[in-house]
Structure formats: C-alpha cells, structure tokens
C-alpha cells in the first residue's frame, strides 16, 4: 500500500431500505455505536427500488464504494423484494468488474435489530475501500 | 336493543392487543389500548428471531408499533391498568388507573439527555437483567410511546429528595416530580382481554440451579442472542468467555403436575430449537443439545424445522429430562445426568451453559384482570372458553385472545386477536364510525412552479448541537438551490416548534420543508401532519437524519460530522425540490364477501362477516355443509360434533345476509380487491357473484393411508374417523392398537398433522371408558398433545393406555393379527396381538387447491396447503390484497384453532368492507403507457400482482394494431418500487421515489465531494 492510500478517506454512498437496514442504522445511532464518517445514506422503501443507473451515477459522481443494504432474505417487508435485489446486484457486480469497479459494490443484509452489524459493515467497508485505494474513475476530489 | 357504545377497551399491549386494536380501529371503532408497562410490544419485542423462519422479531413487529402509535382511532394508555369493569355487553364503564411516570409526554422529545445524567443503575428488565438501565428510562430503543419514565422506586429524588439531575438536564421542561398518576373512566361497548403470560419462575425449582450464573432462562438466552442485547449477540459465560457446549432442558414449569403446572406450553420445543440454531449460526463450533420428553413440532413448518435442526445443523435431541443441574463443588462446572435413549443406564455429561426452557404461565396481573372482569378461569389458570367459541369468555361482551386463553405461539395469538376483534366488532357493528372523528385540515394551497423550500436544522438539545456545528449548517443551507428560508430549533419536534413550522410555511410562502434532525421512521408522520395543518401536501416533506446517522455515531469527530450534516442537508434539499404533491386515491368497491368452503371455518367466517351487516356468499362443493367435521363424531372436549355443527348450520342457512350455494365450485375469478367477479358453477348453479373480498376455507381431507402399516390389506385396520363411528355403534375389539404418524412425518409428507395425537388420545380414552378391560397400545414417535390437551394424554395414561415409542427407521411391522414393534425407550422387541388397528393418518390438502390457487394468484406451500402472507404476523392473509384464508386450508389444526382463524379472516376482511372507499397509498407506482412495451417484466417481480398486462388497441395515423400494455392496480400496489427498477424503458414511475428524485440526491452527493 502506498502512503497516498494511508491518508485516503474514501467516499461511500449507502442505499438503505426503509424497513430493515435504515432501522439498523438508526439503532446503531441509538446505541451510540461509532463508525467512520465516510458514508452518506440514501433511503428507499425497498432495496429492490435500486436501479443499476443509481449505482453507476454514484461512481460517476465520485463514490469510491457503494453499499447496498436491505432486509435479510425472508424478512423483506415486501415479501421478496430483496431477492430481486440480490439477483440484480450479482449482475451489477459482474458488469462493474469489467470497469474495474467490481469490488467497490457490496451488498449486505442488515436487520432492524442489527445496529452492531451496521456499524461493523461500515467499518469493514471503509477499510476495504481504503485498501483498494481511490476509484479509478476520474472525478473531482476535495484537497 | 339497549345502548351500544362504539368503542372497545383492549387490555394488554403485546402483539395480541396490538392486532386487536389495529383491526378494530380500521373497522371504525374507537380503541383504548391499555398496557401496564411503559411501552407496547410485549414479549415479542424481547425476542431475537422467530421460529420456524428465523425472521427478525423486531423487524416484523416495529411497523405495527408505529401503526398503533399514529392511528387516529387508537388511544394508547400505557403504564395503566384496569381497576374495574361495570355494565353489560354494549355498554361497559371501565376504570383505568394510570401510574405516575413523572415525565410530561407533551414535552418529552425522547432526546435522552436525562439518561446520561441519571446516576442510578437498575437491572434492565428488557434485557432480563443482563445489563443495567437508568432510573429514568425508555423500555427499549423502539419503545412506543417514545416517552421516558422515571422508576419511582429507584429514583434518588423521589426516594430521598436528592439529585434532580434529570429535571436540570431537560431542556424542554418535561420532568414533573409532582405527577400523581390518575384514574379515568372510559365508556366502551366491549372489552378484550389480552394481557398474556408470564414466563415460569424457575427459581422455585432449586434443583435446576438458576442461582448459578451460567444457568439461564430461555428468555435471558434470547436477549443474549439478540444483537441489541447485553452482549450484542455473542453468547457469553460468567467468566467472559464463550460457551462451547450448551444444553437446553425442556418442560421447566410445563408438563409438571407435581408443581401444579400440568399443561404443555406449546412453544418451548420450537423456541429451544430456534435458539440452538441461531446460537450455532453465531458460532459454528458450538455443540447444542436439547433434552426433551417429546419434541412438539406440531405447527406449520415446525416438523421440517426440527428435522433440519437435527439432521442438517447437528442439534442433538435427547429424549430424557434431567431432574436437575449438577454443579461440581470444586470446579463450579455444570453437568447433567440423563437416561440413555437405548435404555442402557444413566450418563453424566458436562456443559458450559444450561438454558432452562421455561413455560408460559398465566401472569399475576392476568389473574387479577380475570377477577376484575368477572370471567371464569379454567383449572389451569387460563381464561375459560369453549372450543367452538375460542375467543368468547363466560361474560357476554368480554372477549379473550392469545396466551391468556392458552399457551400458544405468535401466529395463533395474532389469529385469536383478530378473532376477538371480530366478535367485538360484530357486537358493535351498528356503532361503527360513531366515536371516531376525522381530523379537518385547511385546503391545500397551490404549489406553483417556483420551488420555495424551508429548512429547519434541529439541535435536539445537545444531541446534535454538541457534535454538529448547527449554525454552520444553517448558514450553509441558506445558499442551497431552492432554499427560501432556514432556521435553527432546539427541538424541532416540540409542540411550540411545530406551530412555528406551520407559521414559517405561511410567512415565507414555502411549498416544501426539510427538517434536519432525526429518523423519519419515528418522526416523519408527525412533521407531515404539521405540513397538512399549514395547508401543504404531506408528501412535500423530507427529513435529513443528522442524529441517528450522524451526531450519535460520530461523537468524537465534530468537524467531519458537521461536513456530513451539510452533505445530508444538501442531498435532502435536492430531493425536496423535486417532490410533488401526492394523493391517496379513493376507489369505490363492492362491500360483500365470498367464502369458499362450508366447513366449520368457512361457516364461522361467513357468520362473522354477515353479523357485521355485510352480505356474504358461501359456496361448498359437497352437497352438505359441515366439511371435515362431518366425518368425526366427537370433539376433543367430549361433546358430539352434532352439538356444535347443527346449530351452526342452522344459523348459517337462516341468516339474512348469507347466501349458501352447495354442490357448487368456483370456476373463474376476475378483478382484484374491492371488485372481484366470481363465476360459480355446480349442480343447478351457474352464477356470477360480485364481491369485494374473498376467504379461502377449503379445508383438508383425512389421508386414506394406503400402503402404510398394511392399511387396505386387512379389514380390521381403520383410520381415526372410521373408529369414531365404530365406537358410536358399539364395538367389542379387546386389543386395540393405535399407530401415530401413519403416512405423515415422512419424505412424502414431511409435516406434522398437529391434531392426530389429540384425536387419538380422545378416542383411546373413549375406548377405555367404554370398556376398562380393553387393552390399548399407542405406538408413537412423539406425543404432541400441546397446550391444555396434555391433560388428555395424562388421563389416557391414568386409564392404563400403554405408550410405546418407535422411530421412523424402525417402524412397526403389521401382520394380519399381530404387530412387531421395537420399543426405542426400553430397547426391546415386542409382538402385540390386535383385534383392531387404528391409524392416525395426517390431514392432506385437497387436490382442488391446485386449481383454486392460480385463480386467486395466491401461492401454495410445499405440502400443497395455502401459503399465508407472513407466517408470524399475517396468518390469515395473502400477499394478494383482499384475499384471506382460514382453517385447515392453511395447515392441519384443531377445531378451536380453525374457528379462531375464521373469525380472524372475517375481521381482516371486514376492515376493508367497513370503509366507505378503498384508499390507495400515496407513493404507488404508475405506468406511462406511451413508453410501456408490454414486456411483462414488472409482473414477474411484483409480489402483490399489482401490474397486469392488458390488451390495448393502438391507433396511429398510419396503422392500428393490438398490443399489450401494463397497468398497475392502485389498490394493490404497496409502493416498493421494484417494478420501476425492473422496467427496461423507464415507463414506470415509483412515486415519491422517482428516478429523477433519487438521481438528484446522488448528484447532490457528488457536488460536495
């Protein structure tokens, strides 16, 4: 790893579903579980609302990593929405791999009771993207 | 008819009370939901996962908590208890005593500053004493209502006049040490008792050593497993290490007549299995053992779950109940002594942790309430009901549901709760809407083209303000595109601030509002209401979460947190600028019902709908009503089936609101919720029926167990239903053998049929009572007389019925006169001569399910029974709106359970029928027909079948052609947006989460990088 990477603070954009992972993020807050400040959250009702273009746009806008979160399989508020998310994200990772971004998209199921898991997911993903270094896409970066 | 009051008091705010309250409130009745603790949620809120699907308990429960908290027809009375119930059905005076909370709910914003200043530590009840809470507390993070309570017994100020830190720290003047509580009187037409159970107090069984720190109750273990529990989901021993071997001991406080707890608690076998599986998911090296008498996996999906635990996950099940826990005096290590399953003596084995599977007992407060209500209890301490009237107490107008009636699991509790609501609602059907008032809002102002967004940045006391530089965010927001006005608030959600928001909207002519504060999951409904009061559409609102997702999780990074707050506000404003007013559409509908199946479930469902004043058509494919019960002659409570069936059939046939069509079947169905057209054909019947809702109650059949245990080969081998008729006629067989699970719990039918053990026990008792000299042998795998039916098993043993356990791999071999049997518990072979062999064959789903399911677009499970929308919380509903199910169409069950489900299905159906219009949600998806290419991909991803392809004729100047276009049924759409993501041409707009709105947020995200 280069020195540059050590000082690198990645930009993470996280999509949360309203019913499970957003609530998990809320619980992390209520429980005061600390994690790095790198992420910003976009709320959707169901992870199955997330279109491939949202992810591409996020990378285009400067995200170094995109995290998709939703209910665990079987827990979906809309019964099976997250199963579609799962399929779409697998396709998306394949497509991103061809652009050298495959590892920068990650899918994680976080329940409304898993504040701790939300925290851990954040810490681990930030570490992972730090290790990968800045996104290869050219974009503006503060400093 | 004397006075009827259109309100219901529901006692108990667990999942039962919550379900009753929601059903009643949605049927136009006023509800007082009375809960003795500080929050609703009950025991389910404490559970980690639920069996058999391992769903997250809180994830499924918390939307219901939120629904109760904001329902205009529900008045929540927490920390309150009923002290008297006077009057009669239709008109009760109920006195309710509210205990002092010392916190003014109007001022408390649940910011939690007081908690950090409170010096007192108290064992946390929610975590079963696994950690501490403060003397001022919220019961658990998702508690409803979100108001703190001071524990008067522990508070230093209230006990010693010292401290007062909470009052000093509260910036909104919410602490009131002078609170004395109050007693109020409410006038209601009906009362529902649902105060639930108390876990058995295992400290009274000293031999099980609950005094040892590594012996825990199943409730404590549940909290250990929970990621929001004291150890964040890591099971932990008293020395801080993690256990490698855990044992569960079943039936602690259940099936124990010696301590006065005779009944089976119905749920422990499954929760222990679940706990073992979840614990093993956390630690794959973990060894788990469940010591049991029988494994009672009798509910839908339970047997499959048990087999998976045993055969795939390696949970060890041992048919032996250790009589105590041994503690080595030198090492303090735990061990259990148990009988070996092969009958070869006793073994002692060490375990790191022992979990006591404590049973469900009637709570002390439930017993008090039973006395106050003046209803009878049975000799087990549960509320007395009849099996054909499972939710009706002995006092008219007072109903019961859930574990106050008998030990039961969550879906049975939820079904009961809807069933009780149905009965209360039938009683008060003429008063629907009489006590509920719709709130009036000013006319909505025209939004116009100019975006004028107002932003409020909340300090939340010091919760946000101490981490995020709020004035900096305020200044930053002023320069954002579309922002017309920005202000700072100490508490945006306090009542004076809310008035301030409304004033701000008017003064600055705002048409969109962003509040940067906390989570929309708790606060959005309130702010939306404020917008409506200010004449704005409620969808013109956006919350920027800078507390839960920012200041609370970045407490030591003030600068970076401030930057994140600025980004979050910018992203929210960009979205707000594109928000559009949305309206719930009102759709006219047909308010009559259709019930398919004229068994005990279908008849009860039809009656419950008809009793509420709605017309219902009941169709039955056979020439007579009665269903599966027609083939039996006695019920498990000893009464004859005719005693129940005859008056029921008479009532159905004579009811003004019911049309019965026998010898008739549904052949076609069109439409959706509110407007179904059903084509019914049969002997002399050919009708089109219009209806708004439909209930599937098509029942089950008894399997004719051809090929099992020589059935069909010899004449003296019969099934249970045949036996019942033989007993009625009189029979002289001296040696009678029963074989349980004949054709069930095998590869072909992996499920347990739930009712057979109880039915067999009933018949064995009848045979013994008929002739005590008769020899009766019952060959079984597990005896599953759950709940109160354990008494039948005990009675059968007392009468001398001989029980012999066999295993699936060594099944009894049946010859013409004798049976070769290997008794697993005695490790011995037997030859049993028999005159009559009775096979307990499972209930099976009728073949017609496979033609009916596609008509309704509803799914079947792997055993061909109908599959409900959610196995825990929506047991009588389908994902397809407006279609419900009940009785053995869902899974095998006993009469009382079928009746309870029937009322439940009727209750859920009538929440729809009682409204004047069908109302859609605001954020539905819509199709732009110009862009739609009719590919149908949306129809494949929608779980509710809302999008449908329709043939349309397209006319252009050059050509006219027929093609397919998608239409989304607004009454069915739930707004998940999956279809919009799937649509290849962008023809579908997911309202309120449109592609331009989300893309704007992502672009705004990029602007700050």
Image: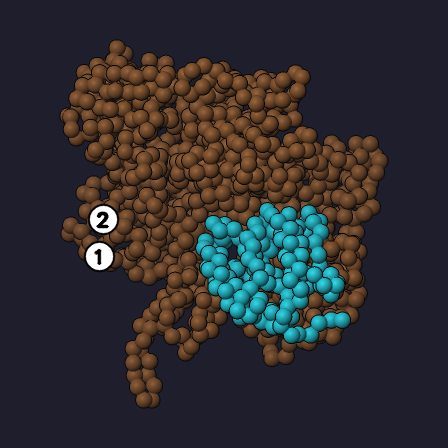
Chain colours: A cyan, B brown
Left or right, A11 with reference to A105:
right
Front-most of residues B173 and B337: B337
> Which labelled disc corresponds to residue B958?
none
Helix, strand or loop status at disc 1 = strand
Q: Where is residue B725 in the image (x, y as percent from the top left)?
A: 20, 26
Q: Is residue B670 left or right of residue B116?
A: left
Measuring from the top left, give residue B340's x and y in whole percent: 45, 19
Please identify the quadrant where the C terminus of chain B is shown. bottom right
**Residue sticking out furthest to the bottom:** B958
Could you classify mark 2 by the number of other residues whose Cα lies within 10 Å: few (under 14), some (14-19), or many (20 or more)?
many
Q: How far apart are marks 2 and 1 (CA)?
A: 10 Å
Judge whether B1006 appears above or below B364 on screen: below
For residue B678, what is the image quadrant? bottom left
Q: Earlier in the sequence, mark 2 or mark 1?
A: 2
One can see residue B35 in this view: no
- Quarter holding the N terminus of chain B is top left
What's the mark number on residue B661?
A: 2
Q: Find residue B850 and report its horizontal and vertical position in percent.
A: 27, 50
Which chain does the numbered disc 2 sit on? B
* Residue designated by label 1: B687
């Amino acid at each position: 790893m280069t020195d540059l990477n050590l000082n690198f603070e990645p930009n993470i954009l996280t999509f949360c579903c309203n019913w499970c992972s957003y609530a998990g993020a809320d619980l992390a807050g209520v429980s005061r579980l600390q994690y790095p400040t790198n992420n910003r959250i976009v709320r959707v009702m169901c992870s199955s609302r997330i279109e491939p273009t949202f992810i591409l746009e996020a990378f285009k806008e400067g995200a170094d990593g995109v995290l998709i979160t939703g209910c665990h399989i079987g827990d979906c508020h809309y019964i099976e929405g997250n199963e579609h998310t799962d399929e779409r994200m697998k396709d998306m990772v394949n497509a991103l791999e061809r652009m050298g971004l495959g590892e920068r998209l990650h899918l994680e199921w976080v329940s409304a009771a898993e504040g701790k898991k939300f925290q851990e997911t954040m810490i681990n993903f930030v570490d992972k993207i730090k290790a990968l270094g800045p996104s290869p896409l050219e974009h503006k970066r503060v400093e | 008819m004397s006075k009827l009051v259109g309100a219901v008091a529901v006692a108990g705010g667990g999942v039962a009370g919550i379900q009753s309250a929601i059903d009643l409130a949605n049927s136009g009745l006023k509800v007082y939901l009375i809960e003795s603790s500080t929050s609703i949620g009950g025991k389910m809120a404490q559970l980690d996962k639920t069996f058999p699907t391992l769903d997250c308990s809180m994830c499924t429960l918390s939307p219901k908590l939120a629904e109760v908290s904001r329902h205009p027809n529900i008045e929540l009375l927490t920390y309150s208890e009923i002290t008297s119930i006077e009057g009669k059905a239709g008109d009760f005076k109920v006195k309710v005593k509210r205990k002092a909370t010392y916190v003014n709910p109007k001022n408390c914003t649940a910011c939690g500053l007081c908690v950090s200043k409170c010096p007192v530590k108290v064992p946390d009840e929610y975590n079963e004493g696994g950690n501490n809470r403060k003397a001022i507390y919220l019961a658990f993070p998702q508690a409803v209502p979100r108001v703190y309570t001071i524990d008067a017994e522990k508070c230093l100020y209230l006990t010693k006049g010292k401290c007062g830190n909470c009052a000093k720290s509260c910036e909104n003047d919410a602490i009131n040490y002078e609170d004395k509580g109050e007693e109020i009187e409410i006038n209601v037409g009906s009362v529902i008792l649902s105060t639930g159970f108390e876990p058995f107090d295992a400290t009274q069984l000293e031999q099980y050593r609950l005094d040892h720190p590594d012996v825990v109750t199943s409730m404590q273990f549940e909290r250990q497993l929970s990621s929001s529990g004291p150890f964040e989901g890591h099971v932990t021993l008293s020395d801080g290490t993690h256990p490698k071997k855990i044992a569960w001991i079943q039936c602690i406080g259940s099936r124990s007549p010696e301590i006065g707890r005779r009944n089976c608690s119905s749920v422990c076998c499954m929760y222990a299995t679940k706990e073992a599986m979840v614990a093993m998911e956390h630690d794959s090296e973990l060894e788990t053992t469940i010591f049991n008498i029988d494994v009672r996996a009798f509910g839908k999906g339970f047997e499959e779950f048990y087999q998976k635990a045993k055969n795939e996950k390696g949970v060890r099940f041992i048919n032996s109940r250790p009589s105590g826990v041994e503690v080595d005096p030198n090492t303090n290590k735990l061990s259990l002594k148990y009988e070996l399953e092969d009958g070869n003596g006793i073994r002692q084995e060490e375990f790191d942790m022992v979990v006591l599977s404590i049973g469900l007992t009637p709570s002390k407060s439930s017993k008090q309430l039973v006395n106050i209500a003046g209803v009878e209890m049975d000799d087990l301490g549960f509320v007395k009901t009849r099996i054909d009237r499972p939710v009706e107490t002995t006092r008219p107008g007072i109903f019961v549901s859930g574990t106050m009636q008998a030990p039961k699991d969550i879906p049975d509790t939820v079904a009961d709760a809807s069933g009780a609501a149905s009965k209360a609602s039938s009683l008060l059907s003429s008063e629907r809407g009489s006590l509920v008032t719709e709130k009036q809002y000013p006319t909505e102002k025209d939004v116009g083209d100019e975006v004028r967004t107002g932003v409020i940045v909340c300090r939340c006391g010091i919760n946000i303000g101490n981490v995020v530089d709020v004035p900096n965010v305020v200044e930053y927001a002023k320069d954002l595109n579309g922002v017309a006005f920005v202000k700072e608030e100490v508490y945006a959600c306090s009542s004076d601030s809310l008035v301030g928001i409304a004033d701000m909207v008017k003064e600055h002519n705002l048409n969109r509002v962003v509040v940067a504060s906390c989570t929309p999951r708790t606060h959005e409904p309130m702010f939306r209401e404020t917008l409506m009061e200010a004449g704005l559409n409620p969808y013109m609102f956006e919350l920027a979460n800078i507390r839960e997702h920012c200041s609370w999780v970045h407490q030591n990074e003030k600068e970076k947190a401030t930057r994140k707050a600025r980004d979050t506000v910018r992203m929210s404003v960009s979205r707000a600028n594109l928000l559009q007013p949305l309206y719930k559409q009102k759709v006219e509908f047909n308010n009559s019902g259709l019930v398919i199946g004229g068994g005990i479930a279908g008849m009860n469902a039809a009656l419950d709908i008809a009793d509420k004043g709605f017309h219902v058509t009941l169709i039955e494919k056979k020439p007579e009503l009665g269903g599966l019960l027609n083939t039996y002659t006695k019920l498990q409570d000893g009464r004859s089936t005719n005693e129940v069936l005859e008056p029921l059939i008479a009532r159905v046939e004579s009811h003004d609101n019911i049309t019965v069509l026998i010898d008739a079947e549904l052949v076609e169905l069109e439409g959706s919720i509110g407007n179904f057209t059903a084509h019914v054909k049969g002997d002399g019947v050919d009708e089109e029926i219009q209806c708004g809702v439909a209930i599937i109650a098509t029942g089950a059949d008894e399997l004719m167990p051809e090929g099992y245990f020589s059935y069909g080969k010899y004449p003296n081998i019969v099934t249970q239903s045949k036996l019942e008729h033989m007993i009625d006629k009189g029979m002289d067989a001296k040696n009678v053998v029963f074989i349980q699970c004949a054709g069930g719990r095998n590869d072909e039918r992996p499920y347990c049929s739930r009712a057979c053990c109880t039915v067999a026990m009933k018949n064995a008792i009848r045979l013994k009572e008929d002739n005590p000299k008769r020899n009766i042998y019952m060959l079984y795998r597990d005896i599953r007389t759950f709940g109160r039916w354990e008494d039948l098993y005990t009675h059968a043993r007392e009468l001398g019925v001989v029980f012999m356990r066999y295993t699936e791999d060594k099944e009894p071999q049946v010859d013409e006169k004798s049976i070769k049997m290997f008794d697993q518990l005695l490790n011995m072979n037997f030859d049993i001569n028999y005159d009559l062999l009775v096979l307990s064959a499972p209930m099976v789903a009728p073949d017609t399910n496979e033609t009916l399911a596609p008509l309704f677009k509803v799914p079947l499970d792997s055993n061909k029974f109908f599959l409900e929308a959610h196995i825990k919380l929506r047991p009588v509903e389908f994902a397809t709106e407006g279609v419900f199910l009940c009785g053995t169409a869902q899974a095998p069950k006993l009469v009382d359970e079928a009746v309870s489900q029937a009322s439940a299905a009727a209750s859920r159906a009538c929440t729809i029928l009682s409204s004047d219009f069908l109302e859609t949600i605001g954020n539905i998806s819509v199709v732009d027909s110009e862009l739609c290419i009719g590919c149908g991909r949306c129809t494949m991803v929608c779980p509710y079948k809302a999008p449908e392809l329709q043939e349309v004729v397209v006319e252009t100047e050059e050509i006219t052609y027929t093609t397919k276009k998608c239409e989304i049924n607004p009454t069915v759409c739930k707004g998940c947006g999956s279809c919009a993501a799937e649509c290849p041409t962008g023809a579908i707009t997911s309202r309120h989460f449109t592609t331009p709105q989300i893309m704007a947020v992502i672009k705004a995200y990029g602007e700050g990088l």
